[in-house]
Amino acid sequence: MGRHALLSASSSKRWLNCTPSARLEEQFAEEAGNSVYAEEGTAAHALAEHKLKRSLKRRSKRPVSDYQCDEMEECTDGYVSYAMEQVELAGQECKDPVVLIEQRLDYSAYVPEGFGTGDLLIVADRVLTVVDLKYGKGVAVEAEWNPQMMLYGLGALELFGAIYDIDVVRMAIYQPRLESVSTWEISVPELMEWVEKELKPKAALAINGEGEFRSGSWCRFCKAKDTCRARAEEYLRLAQMEFKAPALLTDDEIAEVLKVADELARWSADVYAYAQDEAVSRGKKWNGFKLVEGRSNRKYTDEEEAAEAAVAAGYTDIYKKSLIGITEMEKLLGKKRFAEVLGKLVYKPRGKITLVPESDKRQEVMAATAEADFKEEE
């Protein structure tokens, strides 16, 4: 596909929560080239597609990429193993399930001009399974009520709903670098109820650029995030509360700030980065600010020549030598070999006690116990 849908599945969380954002983004030029992370993700998907096709005894030519490494090999191997498990499960429910890889899915019956690409579809008599590989290391994505996965399910139902008697759409998000596999399933009637009550009304607003601007976690990849007034007004309101002494805030105000603290910090960083780029690249003058040369560290013009000069002057203790970090060592050896050679020589200290939202899946620790444990380890 050479183009992206305006109301794409991958951006659905944003346009469902902030319906005018899809049309607003059209005012911004496409960024030149893809980010390193996007290119790395594309390479991982291509390699996973190849390996899965070979596991299914289909013809495929191994892709070549500068991003391929031991970690990518292991992550895609894990994905293929998981995918084949799902294929086997489907085979227990259906004699000959349909397995589609990187399948274009059209859900324009519900969302104007809507389409996307599903990493893996497994179609059986009763259950439709949608699997999505996410190679990033950002945030673990949950499958429950995930609009991207639900749109993929709708697109798949458009293809096979009339042929197979599908009762349930099963969704799985596989994130190997976060060691996360999130699964969820929804009945077809429940999915269609969501379509009528939520999807279609908001898609109708979004395609016309109508509705209210709303800020939230979905702003992260929006092209308009740096200059969006709705986002600015929301975070400035919260920032005003932060400037008060915490003890003067009500419990509800503190909880409200905590919920968006990370987003607030990210927003201010986005605004700063935008303003600096405008000043450096386009000569923009911001009232009360100026461009200066940042601090820098001294460097040798030629390290070999500097070393020779120091040795000639009688100084020999001029080199440092240290063991490479654990992550780098694991990449060098590969996870399996790393565990064999160094597994007994690595430990993980207890993490610092941190306040997080209740939705976080880590086990809760009690305040008194946490304080005692933390003091013991200091």
Image: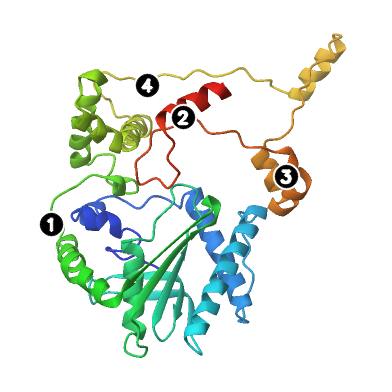
Q: Look at mark 2 in the image and give the residue it sits on.
A: 369
The residue under label 2 is which amino acid type? Thr
Name the residue: 18% across, 60% down. 206
Name the residue: 18% across, 68% down. 200
Mark 3 → mark 4, Cα distance in angstroms: 50 Å
The part of the image, by quadrant, that contains residue 16 is: bottom left
Give the answer, above or below, for where 86 lies relative to 223: below
In front of the other: label 4 or label 2?
2
Q: Where's the N terminus, which quadrant?
A: bottom left
Along the horizontal axis of the image, is 302 left or right of 17? right
In front of the other: label 1 or label 4?
1
Q: Look at mark 4 in the image and give the residue it sits on.
A: 291
Q: Look at mark 1 in the image and give the residue it sits on.
A: 210
Percent position of residue 96, x then y: 51, 89
The residue under label 3 is which amino acid type? Gly
Percent position of residue 70, x then y: 67, 54
Q: Look at mark 3 in the image and give the residue it sits on.
A: 343
Give the answer, above or below, for where 25 lies relative to 246: below
The part of the image, by quadrant, that contains residue 197 is: bottom left
Of labels 2 and 3, earlier in sequence is 3
In front of the other: label 2 or label 3?
2
Mark 3 nearby-residue class (10 Å; few <14, some 14–19, many ≥20): few
The residue under label 1 is which amino acid type? Glu
Mark 1 → mark 2, Cα distance in angstroms: 51 Å
Along the horizontal axis of the image, is 55 left or right of 281? right
Of labels 1 and 4, earlier in sequence is 1
Of labels 1 and 2, earlier in sequence is 1
